[in-house]
Image (tube, rainbow, N blue to C red):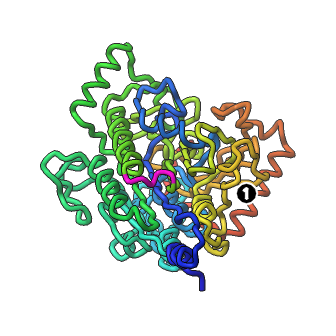
Amino acid sequence: MLKPPFILAATLLAAGTLIAKPLNVVFILADDLGVMDTTPYNPKSFYETPNLERFAKSATRFTNAYAACPVCSPTRSSILTGQYPARTRNTDYFGAPNEFFGEALPADYDPAKNGKFGKAMDKPLLPAPYLGQLAASHTTLAEALKTHGYSTFFAGKWHLGPKGSYPTDHGFDINLGGGQGGGPYGGKKYFSPYGNPTLPDGPEGEHLPDRLARETASFIAAHKDRPFLAYLSFYSVHTPLMGRKDLVEKYEKRRADAGLQDEFIPEQPRKTRSVQSHAIYAAMVDAMDQAIGKVLASLEENGIADNTLVIFTSDNGGLSTSEGSPTSNLPFRAGKGWLYEGGIREPLLVRWPGVSKPGSVSQWTVISTDFFPSILEAAGLPLMPEQHKDGRSFAAALKDSTATNPERPVFWHYPHWGNQGGTPGSAVRLGDWKWIEWYGGSEPALFNLTKDPGEQHNLAKEEHAKAEEMHKLLKDFLTETKAQLPVPNPAAKPAFKQP
């Protein structure tokens, strides 16, 4: 049996051999934050993120980082399992109107009578059934680290199932704020009292991102002498759109001084924001950045920054076509809920002290299934290929940011009607090329992302051989993962037009 790292260290120290302390892990996950919402990726951003900017100077910045899904729960599942949502059946946000708790449609399923598919009832396709919780059969990243003596802490948004499938049911020792909900919908939402059964209320008016950061910093201080995983999962910048009064006023002035107006461009059947100018959203981004700064400072204050792997990323693209359409992801197309780059391309900053080069930039393609094996490798722990079977470690890119990863396809499967206007579909990227297939009749699309990052020029007919290659890759993936697909809806409204 493998000994936990801290026990092994103590054994070797007793024998007179000095070895390095086990590597701590801080994983920071934003909610609905687009890749263009931070100054390390967009120096001209309307939003200020000075703490992330400073952090980027000490970290590796990845320019081809992706979420495994354009909505939240599936990506969160992929991080903790190392598996694609298509394989785990976690393909939509948990609690969606079309949720169906099962592996397949029952034999007697009648779409005209069954209300579980809610908003899709008038459309030509019924979305695929999905499993609305993180299955207990998985060994999560937290459970894997606990096996090796790590203390594990979770703060913030969970959204991976109802009670019985909370963080403490999946390997976390402590849970502050994580539950079934996808946003801070109780009490005064982003301000105390929160009405959150897993987070005690603070003083009246306390701000949620700051509270989560302080709880994380307290955990770090209390566990500085033994290995830990601190998983800070912000509710920010998910709706409801609410900001601190001082920060909203700051960005209202900035908007006025710059003469900015709300501008949109078509994205059928919706429109997408083309200018970052939303003062409340800007205030939310700023407040989250301040909270991140407190967590990073706590590592320095406790003398463990040089022994802590820090990862910052987001769970899907910025919200640009719905629910206030608060941000723009341009030059990337569309946003949350869409399989275009705006819905899945993410910020990713990683600092591995003594290994990653400060201020380096890597073009290595990373998807959220890759965090599990990468963290294990960085910590010097054995990999678990049967669990994180869809993940590939990107440790090599941290050791050498100029390294190129072996050509390997990455996949998305979102067989649902997105609340933000997206159509059910699946996609694959391989090298410069991306292939999207929509279900229900729309023409598939092939894009060269290097030449066309905005996905405006469909090359499927011009590059027929490449289109065939990408189609086969995607078809084989769907077959191998036993992916659930949409089915025709006999109760669809004849007047409905496929986007």
Is 452 included in the stretch rendered in magenta? Answer: no
Q: Which residue is rendered at x = 74% and y = 37% of the image?
A: 448
Q: Quadrant of the N terminus?
A: bottom right
Q: How many marks?
A: 1
- The front one of 221 and 428 is 221
Above or below residue 305? Residue 114 is: below
Give the x, y percent position of residue 373.
62, 64
Magenta span covers which residues? Answer: 302-306
Q: Relative to 367, is 302 on the left or the right?
A: left
Give the x, y percent position of residue 196.
23, 60
Q: Relative to 470, is 303 on the left or the right?
A: left
Q: Which residue is rendered at x = 73% and y = 41% of the image?
A: 402
- The front one of 380 and 491 is 380
Give the x, y percent position of residue 155.
35, 59
Three-letter amino acid code at the position of disc 1: Leu
Q: Quadrant of the C terminus?
A: top right
Dot 1 alpha-carbon crowd within 10 angstroms: few under 14, some 14 to 19, many 20 or more? many
Is 303 included in the stretch rendered in magenta? Answer: yes
- The front one of 284 and 479 is 284
Q: Main secondary structure of the magenta part?
A: loop
Q: Extreme left residue here?
A: 204
Give the x, y percent position of residue 128.
54, 64
Q: Which residue is mark 1?
A: 474
Q: Tell me if residue 309 can be seen.
A: yes
Q: Which residue is rendered at x = 28% and y = 25% of the image?
A: 250
Dot 1 lies on which element? Answer: helix
Q: Tell me if residue 105 can be seen.
A: no
